[in-house]
Image (spheres, grey):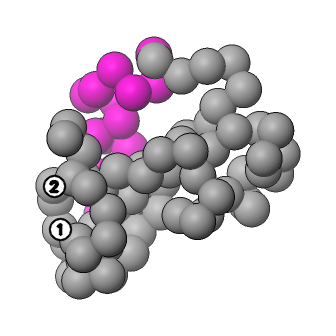
């Protein structure tokens, strides 16, 4: 199963959003939905961001990146969104 992760990254740390990872992100949240399909996982991540105030609370130098990770590795290390 896959879980969507929302990464908040600073442009000053990772000017190229492709370089934004769980290790260098300012904040990492996992969404509550798990899916087996990577495309569905990504769409759930986008929908989660759209339904919350995460994007509105960003500073001008912050960017959002959605990645999908295996649920087992994501649940052990990353807090659920909203906590």
Where does the C terminus fall, quadrant-wise?
top left
> Count of labels shown?
2
- The answer to which of 18 and 46 lies nearer the viewer is 18
Image x and y of residue 69, in percent: 38, 75
Q: Is residue 43 visible?
A: no
> Is 24 on the left-hand or right-hand side of 11?
left
Residue that badge 1 annotates: 34
Q: Is residue 22 rendered to the left or right of residue 80?
A: right
Q: Residue at x 58, y 52 (%)?
A: 25
For label 2, the residue is: 32
Query: Callout 1: helix, strand or loop?
Result: strand
Tell me how far mark 1 sits from mark 2, CA to CA: 7 Å
Using a 10 Å C-alpha cutoff, classify the residue at mark 1 as few (fewer than 14 neighbours), some (14 to 19) or many (20 or more).
some
Mark 2, other Cα within 10 Å: few <14 / some 14–19 / many ≥20: some
Quarter-wise, where is residue 60 in the image? top right
Write the start and end of the magenta stretch as one range: 40-56
Query: Where residue 74 appears, x then y in whole percent?
Result: 31, 72
Q: Which residue shows up at 58% across the image and 65% down it?
A: 23
Q: Is residue 18 visible?
A: yes
The location of residue 70, given as percent across then percent down, is 32, 81
Residue 17 vs residue 78, the one in the foreground: 78
Residue appearing at x 45%, y 16% in the figure: 56
Give 52 or 46, whichever is nearer the viewer: 52
Name the chief secondary structure element in magenta. Answer: helix
């Amino acid at each position: 199963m896959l879980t969507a992760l929302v990464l908040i990254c600073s442009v000053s740390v990772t000017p190229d959003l492709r370089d934004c990872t769980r290790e260098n992100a300012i904040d990492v949240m996992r969404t509550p939905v798990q899916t087996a399909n990577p495309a569905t996982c990504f769409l759930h991540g986008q929908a989660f961001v759209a339904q919350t105030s995460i994007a509105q609370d960003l500073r001008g130098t912050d960017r959002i990146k959605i990645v999908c990770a295996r649920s087992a590795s994501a649940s052990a290390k990353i807090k659920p969104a909203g906590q």
